[in-house]
Image: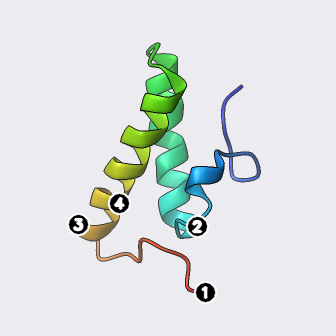
Amino acid sequence: MPWNAEYFPSSMRHLSAVVRLKAIEIANALLTEGMDEGKAIRIAIAKSKEWARRHGLPVREDV
């Protein structure tokens, strides 16, 4: 089942909303290509953090 803004892996909960959406987008694409779920999540989080830093966006939610 693809992830969305309301249903996503718990490891993405610490990400800011915009970065989480990017991570979900990346993870769903990787799953579509047949990648293992755990690996897709790890890669998506790392790549979305890189994307956020390149665009000057906050990576984590302010607590």
Callouts 3 and 4 close, C-beta under 8 Å: no
- Give SS at disc 2: helix
Q: Specify whether 16 is left or right of 35.
A: right
- Give SS at disc 1: loop
State the quadrant of the C terminus: bottom right
Say whether disc 3 or disc 2 marks the residue closer to the N-terminus.
2
Residue 17 circle label: 2
x and y, in percent, of residue 1 in the image: 72, 25
Q: Name the residue under label 3.
A: 54
* Front of the two marks 4 and 2: 4
Q: How far apart are marks 3 and 2 (CA)?
A: 16 Å
Say whether disc 1 or disc 3 marks the residue closer to the N-terminus.
3
Q: Residues within 10 Å of mark 4 (few under 14, many from 20)?
A: many
Q: Distance between the residues labelled 1 and 3?
A: 23 Å
Say whether disc 3 or disc 4 marks the residue closer to the N-terminus.
4
Q: Mark 1 points at which residue?
A: 63
- Give SS at disc 4: helix
Callouts 3 and 2 close, C-beta under 8 Å: no
Q: Distance between the residues labelled 1 and 4?
A: 18 Å
Callouts 1 and 2 close, C-beta under 8 Å: no
Q: Residues within 10 Å of mark 2 (few under 14, many from 20)?
A: some
Say whether disc 1 or disc 2 marks the residue closer to the N-terminus.
2
Callouts 1 and 4 close, C-beta under 8 Å: no
Q: How far apart are marks 3 and 4 (CA)?
A: 9 Å
Q: Which quadrant of the figure has residue 56?
A: bottom left
* Front of the two marks 1 and 4: 1
* Front of the two marks 1 and 3: 1
Q: Distance between the residues labelled 1 and 2?
A: 13 Å
Q: Name the residue under label 4.
A: 49
